[in-house]
Image: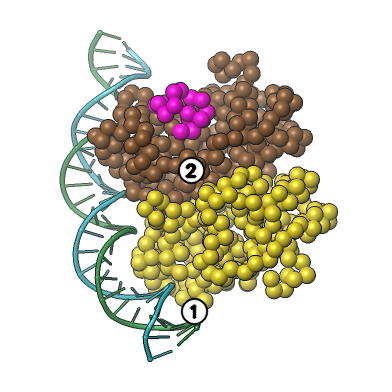
Chain colours: A yellow, B brown, C cyan, D green
Amino acid sequence: MSQDNDDPFRPLIAKLEALSEIDERDREAVRSLPFIGLFATSGEYLVRERQRETSCCVLLEGIACRHKATARGDRQIVSFHVRGDLLDAQSLLFSKSDHNIQTITQASYLVVPSEDLKRVVDARPNLAEALWRDTFIDGSIFREWVLNVGRRDGRSRIAHMLCEFVERCSHAGLGAPHEIAIPMTRADIGDATGLTHVHVNRLIGQLVAEALITVDRDGLRIVDWDRMRDTSAFDPAYLHEAA
Amino acid sequence: MSQDNDDPFRPLIAKLEALSEIDERDREAVRSLPFIGLFATSGEYLVRERQRETSCCVLLEGIACRHKATARGDRQIVSFHVRGDLLDAQSLLFSKSDHNIQTITQASYLVVPSEDLKRVVDARPNLAEALWRDTFIDGSIFREWVLNVGRRDGRSRIAHMLCEFVERCSHAGLGAPHEIAIPMTRADIGDATGLTHVHVNRLIGQLVAEALITVDRDGLRIVDWDRMRDTSAFDPAYLHEAA
DNA sequence: CGATAGATTGATACTGCTCAATATGGGTGG
DNA sequence: CCACCCATATTGAGCAGTATCAATCTATCG
């Protein structure tokens, strides 16, 4: 839980504040929630599809993703998550999960019983509105992913996904703007873009050759944000970040 | 407006009732909303990306879709909508639209000022919860579309999309279960599945040859639901239809 | 130092795209 | 009712982007 031992809900509250007007009583209501703090290794499942869910996770550190799989077993990542994200808020209203949640890196997170969170949300309209907004933004991001996977070629598809990830990390206050390392494997990127890890590797090679990104032990890093943005036609409007 | 002249909100109320517990006062609140009834020809835009939105549309008849486009102009449909669907509920919380809404067929719909709907939603928690659920379901459907477009081959991708559309029509009470005609062009189907209309046409030919679907002047029709479901591994769980 | 996950690279196959023509089925003006 | 128009459907040929399959290489970790 690192520096948040004094207030483990700080990342979530920061996110809620960026979403909507929140007052001190709202913050207090969140802080009063019961929770358990947990660690996960990379690749660990926090939620499985079809599983009955009675709690939500708040991601504190590390990266997680949501994904689904075809009958054949091909994995498709549908979103990435970072510090402050509330995973599976859906469990407030639906008992069964329709997708998996899995860590990409090591992670720490809080587990909050859905019924307690639901009680707080019902009592505090500001929180309800913030979470509803978050649900809409989620939807907007999924729409962009459908477009990305459906209509862009491999190269710009990867570039777009990387831009989004970096932009969201920046917005969440992780590292200097657009300079964070992206600790994903070729397979992760392939599963997020609908490509194979082999092809992803070749395209990453292209992007490195063009000096748009670099690769080091921590993962990928965007080194020419402007050209990455242009080459993938990344426009962050769909993230609805402006509060 | 057809047979709904007495209660134009009936389709919306039916949908809300399927989503959540709604009482007579909730229904009355919806019925009291100001609205304008409009008709649209096929292909007409109801909302454009980046446009400032101050109202929502309730679809009464016909089919509509939401879509986005790449910088190159390739269109990607991200969802279809039928009778009772509330289009762009997002305008309750965000002023600018991040996608387009366009009719696929002729359509009739209601336009309701966002601020009035917002007022009613704020006053009636049941309605707020129903709409939040709807937002979650939207998200779940988008996730399935990311999977569909990202990881299934053309044939099952089309089959899956058709199954979903027919299933949703059935749930909305349109026609006999799974027997409704699907009045989409090859281009519409291509834009929904990330394929070209040429390739869609070839794959549709395959499905017809295999006697899974037929084509007539009204569009496509699924004639062997079980095999369509199996071939596309369509599992409606993600639609969260059970109230 | 072996074990392993992940990265790379090469060769080959195939799905789906592009471009280009032609066919059809309604719908319209006269 | 006819000739024409337009959107859509259909078909063919050739090509491009990605997938597949199979090694090999390279860090990192116990």
Is B226 left or right of B115, judged from the image as shown? Answer: left
Q: Chain letter for mark 1, please.
A: A
Residue at the (70%, 38%) spot, across then down: B128
- Quick one: A202 or B140, which is closer to the camera? B140
Q: Which span of residues is magenta-colored?
A: B167-181
Q: Position of residue D9 (x, y in %)?
A: 29, 32
The residue singled out by tag 1 in the image is A217
Residue type at the position of mark 1: Arg
Q: CA distance from mark 2 to mark 1?
A: 37 Å
Question: Outermost residue toward the right?
Answer: A25
Per the image, the residue denoted by label 2 is B78
| Residue B164 located within the stretch drawn in magenta | no
Q: Secondary structure at mark 1?
A: loop
Residue B64 seen by the camera: no
Q: Are marks 2 and 1 in contact (CB under 8 Å)?
A: no
- Left or right of residue A63: residue B174: left
